[in-house]
Image (cartoon, helix red, strand yellow):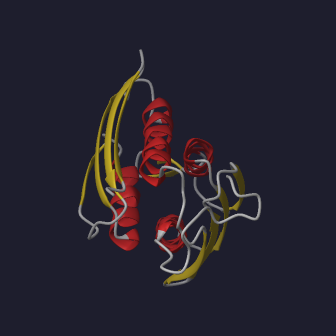
Amino acid sequence: MSRSATIQRTTAETDVHVTLSLDGTGRAEVTTGVGMFDHLLTSMAMHGLFDLQVRTVGDLHIDEHHTVEDTAIALGEAFDGALGTRAGIVRFGHAAVPMDEALATATVDAGGRSYTVMSLPFLAPTIGTLGTQMIPHALEAFARSARMTIHLTATGRNDHHLAEASFKALARALRMAVEPDPRRAGIPSTKGTL
């Protein structure tokens, strides 16, 4: 069974196209018009071993908010679609990733419950053209549409390192959570459903 999905999300503010394969090699083609966000999503694909194509055209003449948020929503929808019923997956994943002085820890439950808990103490208002307040906002939008719980904490003195370590940790935790579990045939829940 192919664990992949294609999402097209078009609004009056953005046009987003996402193609995702959970069982990839980490290939990524990401173009949103927001350089740092492209870098973070490319890093997420690379370290999660997801094949990812993202093409977003948004109202960047206003700011990056709609572009980043709608891309995150579509990416979450792609994860949700690629996971299908979620039968036979590991479900839980965790990872800690250092990047120089920064350290990020991510824990994921891919069990269908949307929730986020984050502590990302950025120091500056932007990294390139990406507002640092958009990073937790994008991750919340992603968790909601992916129907996942994400706990993500990071420390560091360099905002670029803090953000990149966070996305790498999330990628590794996602990879673990969505992996097929060779010992599990059904839904990974005592309820029998997610």
The residue lying at 70 percent from left, 54 percent from top is 116
- Which image quarter: residue 48? bottom left
Q: How many marks?
A: 0
Q: Position of residue 76 (x, y in %)?
A: 50, 46
Where residue 149 sits in the image (x, y, percent)?
67, 57
Of 141 and 137, nearer the camera is: 141
Spot occupied by residue 66 in the image (x, y as percentages of width and height): 48, 30
Residue 78: x, y in percent? 42, 45
The front one of 171 and 67 is 171
Residue 92 seen in render = yes
User: Is 15 placed left or right of 121 in the picture?
Assistant: left
Question: Residue at 52% of width from left, 67% of height from top?
Answer: 88
Vertical placement of residue 124 versus 10, above or below: below
The residue positioned farthest toward the right in the image shown: 191
In the rendered image, which quarter is residue 6 located in?
Answer: top left
Along the line of sight, the residue nearer the viewer: 50 or 164: 50
